[in-house]
Amino acid sequence: MIKNLMAMLVLASMAMAPAAVAEMKIVVLDPVRAILESDEGKVLVDAANKEMESEQSELRSMAEQIQEQQTKLQKDGEILSDSDKRKIVKDIESMQADLQFGSQKLQKTAQDKRQEILQTLAPKYDRVLKDLIQIDQIDMILAPNSLQYANDKHDITRRVVEKLNEARD
């Protein structure tokens, strides 16, 4: 008897589930994209990129020097002495290690700055999102990277960006 009752409850809940889902308002939102595409986010990203410009240019210069040394080694390899070849190879390896370290350092700095921007704008984003949830009576928000497919009409990221741009601190 208990098994029959449980089976009936399961069947009843399954029958009701589509109706409950049909009433729910489910949207898709990419919070990182919304924050970084807002006017304030773009300004902060541009400022962060300007701060890192000198490091980027230094890394480009280092990469060019490595390329020049490799070209020299290929072009003049036959006329260079063995000790000169070893010295150039050693210099190239040293510069490559420095370049790799510098690239990793710059990448870490960029990640830190991005995280800082997200944290700076998070309170404003939260206020805008809470307002939209109440206005639109949103029941569930999903991240686009956790979905296999979502119709663009359910994506409210652009709308959040617009509201962030309108919002005053």
Image: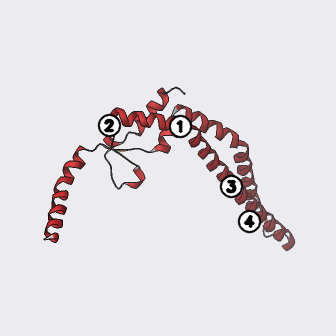
Residue that appears at 40% across and 50% down: 144
Closer to the N terminus: mark 2 or mark 1? 1
Q: Which mark lies nearer to you, 3 or 2?
A: 2
> Quick one: 3 or 57, which is closer to the camera?
3
Q: Which residue is mark 3?
A: 103
Residue 123 tag number: 1
Quadrant location of the C terminus?
top right
> Quick one: 1 or 79, which is closer to the camera?
1
Closer to the N terminus: mark 1 or mark 4? 4
Give the alpha-carbon distance from disc 4 to disc 2, as whole Å: 67 Å
- Identify the secondary structure beneath mark 3: helix
Q: Position of residue 11 (x, y in %)?
A: 16, 61
Q: How is the image coloured?
A: secondary structure
**Amino acid type for the residue under numbered disc 2:** Gln
Relative placement, left or right, of 9 versus 108 is left
- Identify the secondary structure beneath mark 4: helix
Q: Position of residue 107 (x, y in %)?
A: 65, 52
Task: Tell me if label 3 and label 2 are in contact, CB under 8 Å.
Answer: no
Closer to the N terminus: mark 3 or mark 1? 3
Residue 137 tag number: 2
Residue that appears at 70% across and 50% down: 60
Q: Which mark lies nearer to you, 4 or 2?
A: 2
Task: Tell me if label 4 and label 3 are in contact, CB under 8 Å.
Answer: no
Closer to the N terminus: mark 4 or mark 3? 4
Give the alpha-carbon distance from disc 3 to disc 2, as whole Å: 46 Å
Q: Quadrant of residue 134?
A: top left
